[in-house]
């Protein structure tokens, strides 16, 4: 027990002394979240810039929603591509016979599809106007009342509200990712340093149990993971005004679990690295793929076998659990499975680490 | 295992290969209490691997090592061994005291006993004034001395020092050897690897390891006689030439 405590105290002191690493763990996630928040929450209200040739029927142009587009008029028979380039248009609309010809810039495909839907809408709206006019005429001529029901749309939301953005969706996953990433990196590098400086040999030349060493590391870095999570979550709620509707305690517990999993994976992977630089090389292999499968990109649209990969990655369970709690407000019943699987990861890699230390001491 | 004659540690017919490379072949050494054993040999000859097999950090392919009559590897026995590796193996962000406390705790010492042994050993290596300094600010020699103090913390009966006096001033090196001799008189057994030949002269027993084999084993006087040499340095040079 005294050995476990010694490791815990030493790990804690080392992190506290290393101000840069501490800042990296605590402040870097906050900086990145703030930037992401700015990026996603300020870019929602851009207008499409559309050039219109003078032979396009005015009725259709009037049906375009003025809140979404700015219109510029051009004489017909121009080089459209050149106009799009020189005036930085998103699309150019012309007409030949009974066709509307839309040339999209298509630098950003989402804008192209916006243009498409806006015009499809505008055609529909102008047609309906014509129809209702004829309907009125008919009803005047025949003096029978033709009523058309006036339906309007009212949206309501199961989760979030009308102001929910992409940032709200990915925020829970990002929290999990940051905790995973920084703990993975720092713990792995710590063990490599321990090996290259010779302190690991010296440690193992004392009667300490290999398990005490691993558990001491878990406790020490676990402590900072808790601190990190608290800071990120509180910052998000009170400064970034992200709504978390579920139980905050469940969020924290999930993150601690992620941190511990990241820790044991980091320690395990570091056995295969000979230097800090080689540890960095594991980032594109171990960390980046997890981002794609953690739920930031919707998984349900992927092919079945691709989705299978996500079952192997701990961060997908973490993202699942955090989304359930923070966005849907679901409780323990829903996330128990995710927790259990994370625990399985934790046990397997803890065990592997304890066995792996045999490389440095045979008992 | 024979410890009736006060054997502290014994290595019997140990061989060890890393992959296809044979690192140790048929090494046999015994060390009794009160003895200083010096392992000398060119770098890469297998001195450190011999020590690691003895400590149980490496497992020998054949043969066995025993300490205090117990077959190694054995975790409990490590409590009675002071080990200093080739690197200083210190936590640079921590103070000397924090390093000492950490390793002391790992050896199972705490409280007043720990404070007493820290003060005693820091005085021994002449670092009492630097107890509260961060190790990163230490000079190379200071780090080596602190590392030595840590190895001696638990008042071990077997002390294993891999290149203990690298980067230490001549006067302090002399002090350390005086201290090692005092420990030997107190019936401790000490194993030292070294490159410094005049240090080898101070050992009771010299094991000359070349290419993973014990090339010669005996007291300094015996070795000098055997190789018709005036000094251990000469023995070393002659041995190296004749092994090629």
Image (tube, rainbow, N blue to C red):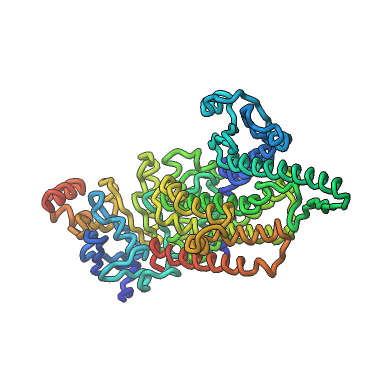
Residue A331 position by quadrant:
bottom right
Q: Quadrant of the N terminus of chain A?
A: bottom right
Count of residue discs: 0
Relative horizontal placement of residue A342, taking residue B193 as reference (left or right): right
Q: Nearer the viewer, residue A48 or A262?
A: A48
Residue visible at 65% across and 50% down in the picture:
A171
Relative horizontal placement of residue A138, taking residue A307 as reference (left or right): right
Residue visible at 45% across and 44% down in the picture:
B143
Q: Nearer the viewer, residue A38 or A86?
A: A86
Residue A38: percent from left, percent from top = 67, 38
Q: Quadrant of the C terminus of chain A?
A: bottom left
Residue A69 position by quadrant:
top right
Relative horizontal placement of residue B25, taking residue A24 as reference (left or right): left
Q: Nearer the viewer, residue B24 or B199?
A: B24
Residue A354: percent from left, percent from top = 47, 65
Q: Is B122 above or below relative to B53? A: above
Residue A328 position by quadrant:
bottom right
Q: Residue furthest front?
A: A142
Residue B241: percent from left, percent from top = 12, 48
């Amino acid at each position: 027990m005294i050995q476990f405590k010694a490791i815990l105290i030493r790990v804690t002191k080392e992190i506290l002394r290393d101000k840069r690493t501490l800042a990296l763990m605590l402040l870097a996630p906050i900086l990145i979240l703030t930037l992401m928040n700015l990026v996603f929450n300020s870019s929602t209200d851009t207008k499409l810039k559309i050039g219109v040739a003078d032979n396009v029927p005015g009725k259709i142009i009037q049906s375009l929603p003025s809140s979404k587009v700015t219109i510029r008029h051009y004489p017909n028979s121009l080089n459209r591509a050149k106009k799009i380039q020189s005036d930085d248009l998103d699309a150019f609309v012309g007409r030949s016979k009974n066709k509307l010809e839309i040339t999209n810039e298509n630098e950003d495909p989402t804008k192209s599809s916006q243009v498409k839907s806006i015009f499809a809408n505008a055609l529909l709206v102008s047609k309906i106007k014509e129809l209702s006019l004829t309907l009125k005429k008919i009803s005047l001529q025949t003096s029978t009342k033709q009523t058309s029901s006036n339906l309007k749309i009212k949206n309501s939301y199961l989760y979030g509200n009308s102001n929910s953005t992409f940032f709200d969706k990915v925020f829970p996953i990002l929290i999990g990712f940051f905790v995973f990433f920084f703990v993975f990196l720092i713990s792995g590098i710590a063990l490599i340093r321990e090996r290259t400086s010779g302190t690991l040999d010296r440690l193992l030349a004392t009667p300490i149990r290999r398990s005490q060493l691993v558990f001491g590391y878990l406790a020490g870095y676990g402590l900072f993971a808790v601190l990190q999570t608290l800071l990120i979550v509180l910052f998000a709620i009170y400064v970034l005004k992200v709504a978390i509707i579920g139980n905050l305690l469940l969020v924290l517990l999930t993150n601690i679990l992620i941190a511990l999993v990241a820790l044991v994976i980091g320690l395990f992977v570091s056995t295969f690295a000979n230097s800090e630089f080689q540890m960095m090389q594991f980032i594109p292999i171990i960390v980046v793929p997890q981002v794609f499968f953690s739920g930031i990109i919707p998984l349900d649209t992927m092919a079945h076998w691709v989705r299978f990969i996500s079952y192997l990655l701990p961060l997908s369970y973490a993202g699942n659990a955090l989304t359930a709690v923070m966005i849907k407000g679901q409780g323990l019943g829903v996330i128990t499975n995710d927790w259990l699987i994370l625990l399985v990861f934790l046990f397997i890699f803890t065990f592997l680490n304890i066995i792996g230390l045999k490389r440095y001491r045979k008992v | 295992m024979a410890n009736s004659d006060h054997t502290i540690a014994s290595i019997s017919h140990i061989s060890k290969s890393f992959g296809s490379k044979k690192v140790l072949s048929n090494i046999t050494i015994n060390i009794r209490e009160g003895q200083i054993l010096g392992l000398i040999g060119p770098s890469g000859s297998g001195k450190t691997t011999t020590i690691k097999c003895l400590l149980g950090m490496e497992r020998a392919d054949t043969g066995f090592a025993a300490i205090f009559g117990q077959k190694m590897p054995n975790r409990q026995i490590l409590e009675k061994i002071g080990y200093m590796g080739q690197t200083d193996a210190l936590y640079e962000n921590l103070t000397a005291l924090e390093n000492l406390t950490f390793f002391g705790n790992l050896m199972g010492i705490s409280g007043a006993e720990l404070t007493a042994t820290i003060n005693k050993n820091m005085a021994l290596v002449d670092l009492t004034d630097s107890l509260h300094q961060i190790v990163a600010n230490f000079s190379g020699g200071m780090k080596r001395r602190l590392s030595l103090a840590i190895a001696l913390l638990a008042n071990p009966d077997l002390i294993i020092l891999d290149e203990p006096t690298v980067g230490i001033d001549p006067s302090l090196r002399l002090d350390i050897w005086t201290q090692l001799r005092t420990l030997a008189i107190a019936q401790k057994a000490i194993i030292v690897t070294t490159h410094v030949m005049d240090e080898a002269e101070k050992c009771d027993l010299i094991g000359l390891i070349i290419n993973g084999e014990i090339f010669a084993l005996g007291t300094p006087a015996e070795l000098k006689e055997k190789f018709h040499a005036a000094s251990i340095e000469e023995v070393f040079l002659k041995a190296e030439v004749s092994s090629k």
